[in-house]
Image (tube, helix red, strand yellow):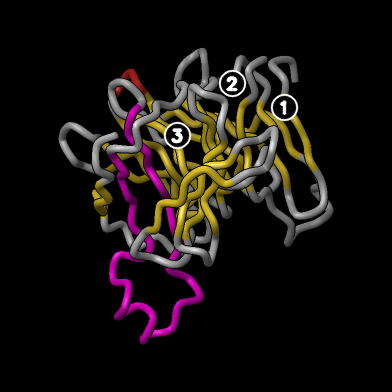
Amino acid sequence: MSSIKIECVLPENCQCGESPVWEEASSSLLFVDIPAKKVCRWDALSKQVQRMTVDAPVGSVALRQSGGYVATIGTKFCALNWEDQSVVVLAAVEKDKKNNRFNDGKVDPAGRYFAANRRSVYKLEKEEHIPDGMCIDTEGKLWVACYNGGRVIRLDPETGKRLQTVKLPVDKTTSCCFGGKDYSEMYVTCARAGLDPEALLRQPEAGGIFKITGLGVKGIPPYAYAG
């Protein structure tokens, strides 16, 4: 196995970065900054980042088979058109609970977009968490970002045994995904909200996007929403 390398590829200073998704067609990483109400797209080739601001905290973003993206914004499932920065509401839940919001979301192999708040789980199927901070490799093992743990761990889902630990130079690791041209790279989001000035001095890259190479395993491409 080659040696593991960890680097901050984008010092984004996310208050709470989440929901990293690799878009193979554009060699880009999508992710959100939940409280900043932003969806971001980082081009791994040009190293440039584009940002789209929405009107409520955005819990997750995902690819869409028909083009563009989908995202959970507040308590709404929305379609995003990146070219004109427009948002179209596809479905809304719990409209009476104004302070509620989706916390995470992912698309399953059937193309359904699942999202969860702190009390409920919903799904958006093409007609109408999703473990938090996890992804899976081609060997069927789980990779889990540990919030306040500053690490990503690899687990055997059948035995629960920890197989590998990768420590990062930040405490609040939030989520992870595989990407790159052969899905051999891992991208990790993290947060800086809640860190005091002393902690920020110790971890100036908090809120950035990290790339891990040399893991010796590959991931599977993300699923796209079928609607």
Residue 205, quarter of picture: bottom left
Under mark 2, the amino acid is: Tyr
Residue 84 is left or right of residue 193, and the answer is left
Give how far across and how far down residue 91 sits, in percent. 72, 32
* Earlier residue among tags 2 and 1: 1
Mark 2: secondary structure: loop
The numbered dot on residue 124 is: 1
Judge left or right: residue 223 versus residue 15.
Answer: right
Determine contact: label 2, label 1, CB under 8 Å: yes
Q: Position of residue 163 (x, y in %)?
A: 52, 43
Q: Amino acid at mark 1?
A: Leu
Task: Give the labeled residue for mark 3.
Answer: 21
> Could you say where residue 136 lies in the image, as x and y percent from the top left?
53, 31
Question: Is-magenta flag for residue 9?
Answer: no
Number of residues whose C-alpha sits closer than 10 Å to that of mark 1, classed few (under 14), some (14–19) or many (20 or more): some
Q: Nearer the viewer, residue 146 or 44?
A: 146
Which-is-in-front pick, marks 2 and 3? Answer: 3
- Give the residue number, with chain letter if any, for mark 2: 225
